[in-house]
Image (cartoon, rainbow, N blue to C red):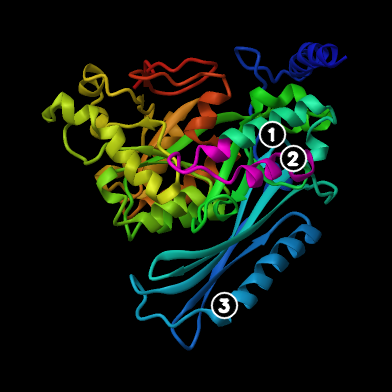
Amino acid sequence: MRRTRMIRRKALWPALGLILGLILGLVLPGGRAAAEAISPLHKVTNTYTDTRNDNKSVVRLWHAETALESVTEEINGIAEHWAAEIGPGLPEARNNTKLNSRVDVEIRYSRTGHKWLSFLVQARTQYHRDLTDQIFTTRTYDMETGERIRLTDIFDGEAETWRMLADGVREGLTAYWPEETPDPEKLEALCAREALERADFTMHGMSLVLHYPAEALYEGKKTLMQVTFFYPKIRDMMTETAWAETDNLSYYKTCALTFDDGPSGTNTPKVLNSLMETGAAATFFVIGNRIEEYDYLVQREHDEGHAIGSHNWNHGNAAKASKAALRAMPAKVNKAMIKVIGIPVRYDRVPGGRYPPMIKAKVGWSYIQWSLDTYDWRGRKTTAVMSKVKKAIQDGDIILCHDIKDNTPESTRQMVRYLEEEGYMLLTIDELFAKDEVELQPDTVYYRCVDGDTSKRSDT
C-alpha cells in the first residue's frame, strides 16, 4: 500500500503542477512554475530593543509582528517571558565588549510553501563572551488559519516513516563531537517515536530541521544541535498537505547568500542581525585562524541556523603553500571548528577562488565558488551592490559577499527583501545542492546549482 501511494504522489503532483502552469501560462523552461513573490502570510517585521540593567548587563529582546495577531502574541509572549525571567539575574558586566554580561532573546523565522511559517525562540545567555546557557522552543503555524503544525501533521503514521526519522536523529546527533560517545540510553530515548512526535523542529526552504540542546547528550556543551532532513529525501513520507507546503521548487526560484573572510567582531554581528530581521539563512565561509578568537560568533552562526564552511586556515595564496601544508588543513580547521560547534565543515571556499592548488594536492574538500559577485569586498556602497544583484541574479546562483565589510549588513538586508519579492527562496549551500539531489564530491568545484547544473555561468 505504501509503495502504491508513493508512486501515485510522484506521478500526480508534478503533472498537476505542470498542467496548472500551462493553463495559467506560468511554466518556465524545464517545466518549473514561474516564481512567486513572497506571500503576505509569510511577511514578518522582526526588530530588537536593548535594555541596560543597573549592573551594565544587557537584555536584547527581539519582537516579531506577523500576519496573524494570535501568532504574534504567542511568539512574543514566550520571548518577553524569558527576558523578564533571565534579565534581572544577569551578573555584573565589567565593560561592553569582552567582559560583557548579556542575554539575547531571539526570534528566528523561516518559511515554506504558501502558508507555513516556522519560529525558533531562543534565549542565549553570555558572560565574558562565553555562552553560559541556552533555552529554546519552536513553533510552526499555518498562517492562514493560525493552526499549529506538528510533526504528526507532516508525516504519515506508518512505522517505517518514524524509523527513518529515528535513524536520521541518531546519525545526526552522534555526528557532534565525534571523539565523544553520548549516553546510549539518552540517545535512544530521543529516538523513540513518542519523543520524535514532540520534538522541536523548524521548516525552511528545502529542509526540515529538528533541534536539540547539546547538554541533553554531551555534558557541559551549550551548542544547539541540528538534525537536517532535506525535502527530496522525505517528501514521499509526507501527508498531502505537507507535500504541497514543501513543494517550493514549483513556486520559487532559489539562490544562496554566502559570506567570506569572517568572523569580524564589528560587522559579522550586524550581518547576523540583518539575517535575523529578514528571516534568511546564509552560509559563512570562516577563516580557520579566526575561529578561536571569534568562537562566540562562529557558535552564534551555527546556533542561528546558518551553514558554515571553511575559507582555508588563513587568507593567503594557496599556490604559495606546500602540498603537505594544504593536505593538513582540513584536520587543522576541523579541530578548531569541532571545539566550538561540535561538527566539522563539509566544504571549502579557497581565498580568491584559487582552488587549483587544493585539487592538485588532493586535499579532499568540495570547493564552492560563486556565480554572482557583489563586489562588496571593494567597499562598494549598498546602492552599487543592489544594482549588480538586480542586473545579474539568476535561478540557482551562489552570491558572494563578505561579512567583514562595513556596508554588507545593510546590503544583506536589502538583498533579501528584493530577492523575496522577485520570487527567490534563499537557501543554505547544503539546501541549494540537496534540492536537486546533487551530492558534493571531494576535489570537485561547484559554481551554482540549477536543475542539477553546477557549472560556471557562461555570462560571468
Q: Could you tell me residue 60's position as x and y percent? A: 53, 70
Q: Does the magenta stretch include residue 388?
A: no
Left or right for 2, reference 52: right
| SS at circle 3 | helix
Alpha carbon distance from label 3 to label 1:
37 Å
Residues packed near mark 1 inside 10 Å, few (<14), some (14 to 19) or many (20 plus):
some
Which one is closest to the eye, mark 3 or mark 1? 1
**Sooner in the amino-acid sequence: mark 3 or mark 1:** 3
Image marks 1 and 2: residues in contact by CB distance under 8 Å: yes
Label 1 amino acid? Ala
Q: Could you tell me residue 200's position as x and y percent? A: 69, 48
Of residues 331 and 415, the one nearer the viewer is 331
**Sooner in the amino-acid sequence: mark 3 or mark 2:** 3
Residues packed near mark 3 inside 10 Å, few (<14), some (14 to 19) or many (20 plus):
many
Label for residue 241? Answer: none
**Which residue is under mark 2?**
192
Q: In this view, does 307 lie above or below 128?
A: above
Locate the C terminus by quadrant.
top left
Q: Is residue 187 magenta?
A: yes
Alpha carbon distance from label 1 to label 2:
7 Å
Left or right for 413, reference 66: left
Q: What stretch is highlighted in magenta?
A: 172-195
**Which residue is under mark 3?**
87
Residue at screen point 51% across, 79% down? 90
**Which residue is under mark 1?**
166
Residue at screen point 82% across, 38% down? 153
Alpha carbon distance from label 3 to label 2:
35 Å
Label 2 amino acid? Ala
Q: Could you tell me residue 231's position as x and y percent? A: 66, 28
Left or right for 132, reference 404: right
